[in-house]
Image (tube, coloured by chain):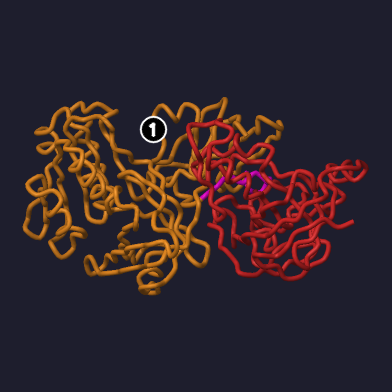
Amino acid sequence: MANEKPDMTEAFSHPAAEAAMKTEGGARDWTGVLLHIHIAPQASYEMEELDEAVCVPGRGIEGDRYFLGSGTYSTRPDVREITLIEQEALDALARNDPPLQAGPIRLDPIDHRRNLTVRGVPLNHLVGRRFRVGEVILRGGRLNFPCKYLETLLDLPVFLPLYNRSGLNCGIERGGIIRPGDIIEMLD
Amino acid sequence: MGNRLVMKLRVADMRAETPDVLGLRLEHPRRPSLPAWSAGAHVDVHLPHGGIRQYSLCGDPEDLGHYQIAVKREHLGRGGSTWLHEHLRAGTELPVSAPRNHFRLDPQAGPHLLIAGGIGVTPIAAMARTLKRRGTAFRLHYCARDQAHAPLLADLEAVCGAELTTWLSADDRRLDPIAVLGAATGARLYVCGPRRLTDAVEQAALALGWPAERFHAERFTALEDADFRPEPFEAVIASSGARLQVPAERSLLSVLADNGIAPDSSCEIGVCGACECGYLEGEVVHRDVVLGPDDRATRLMTCVSRGKGTIILDL
């Protein structure tokens, strides 16, 4: 953990994004929607839901721990301006699909510690891709990876069931204001 | 030791339990149910200027609609309790961690002996509620100056009935640990209160040959050993091989933090358990009041405990 402001890696400079940008393909014909926006003022603090949020390129969401530099993270530079997760993944956990643990896990949008909860957005296809959330343009930098920190914080066995559907860490290419209900779609 | 989620809880109700103890009922502004806990657990209260204070939960573990804590104003303390007494109002939002427990009740049935002194009654009160519900035999001995300075007394009278014995020094009634322990041989013993009480009970337990696994104490301050002279030592980080020199006047925790290895930390006096760390080799001088004898073979608290010569940390 460190408490100084972390170095942000520009999303498309991340090795995962660089590799993906050289590869054609992936899901394109989709339209998704932003369901929830959450920020946490400090590491370990419970997330707070917002009706609207200001996204700032190179920084993150105003008021969030990564914007403020008060988050929990390794000290090496990374893509962490804004994080997304699919509501579909949370729905699967809630019906214990796949059955990797004792039973269903209810992981509410306030608990998963990603900033944006989205529906209808194939996040795993968006590494190295540009897409918009309302007026804001995001760049997919790398897949999020479930961390033991979250498991400890929530006291829920979420590590395994979130594997490969833990969401997407993005950079902000064009800032602006986002609100729940905003349309999400591919650019380019 | 993991992080605990920090929630901004609302002060739903507050009242003077005694002239210097503030009772607080804390609720979540949006969630009907708080994280579960068991008797003996405490929460970290985060103060606005960066300090953290631990308070035992003294309510009913079965009621997750709210947490109940009691804050004694410590005039000679570090300022946290004074701030809480002077600034909290009904409706104030206070950052509070999810509970953790270093003072757990033994799940076994069989008689329990609870001994509390003053504000040390807080975890003991939760234990009494739990034992009563379980139908486990117990006795609670509660030491205080007088009725007006005995937090939660009316509450405990209602919960415990005849199982409660009070020892009020104003009435010239003082607990005799040898007599009380002697009458409860075989019981699981839990004591919480000021050092002089926990020390006296511990000495009585030793004198009576009380089994160590049936003796549980929670102390307010870490071991105060006037003869302790910190010495410099070396800490080796197992994963990187880095060799860190810890001078006599500094803690292992602070040297780790300087080198970019920052364990969680909270009380920094060896009572909360946040900065626990494993070690692989070396002799450790344990100075915390959290770890039991078995844990001490492989774990240490980096805020107060030190090495002799060189120790290898499992980091």
Q: Colour of chain A?
A: red
Left or right for B53, reference A122: left
The image position of residue A115, as x and y in percent, is 65, 57
Magenta-span inclusion, residue B263: yes
Front-lying residue, B210 or A16? A16
Q: Classify mark 1: residues with Cα within 10 Å, few (<14), some (14-19) or many (20+).
A: some
Residue at position x 49%, y 40% in the image: B301
Q: Secondary structure at mark 1?
A: loop
Would residue A102 be seen by someone viewing this image from the given angle? yes
Front-lying residue, B206 or B105? B105
Relative to B298, say whether A172 is above or below: below
Q: Chain of mark 1?
A: B
Residue at position x 46%, y 52% in the image: B267
Relative to B194, say whether A96 is above or below: above
Front-lying residue, B110 or B81? B110
Q: Colour of chain B?
A: orange
What's the amino acid at mark 1?
A: Gly
Magenta-span inclusion, residue B310: no
Q: Quadrant of residue B111?
A: top left
The image position of residue A35, as x and y in percent, is 63, 59
Chain part drawn in magenta: B256-265
Residue at position x 67%, y 60% in the image: A34
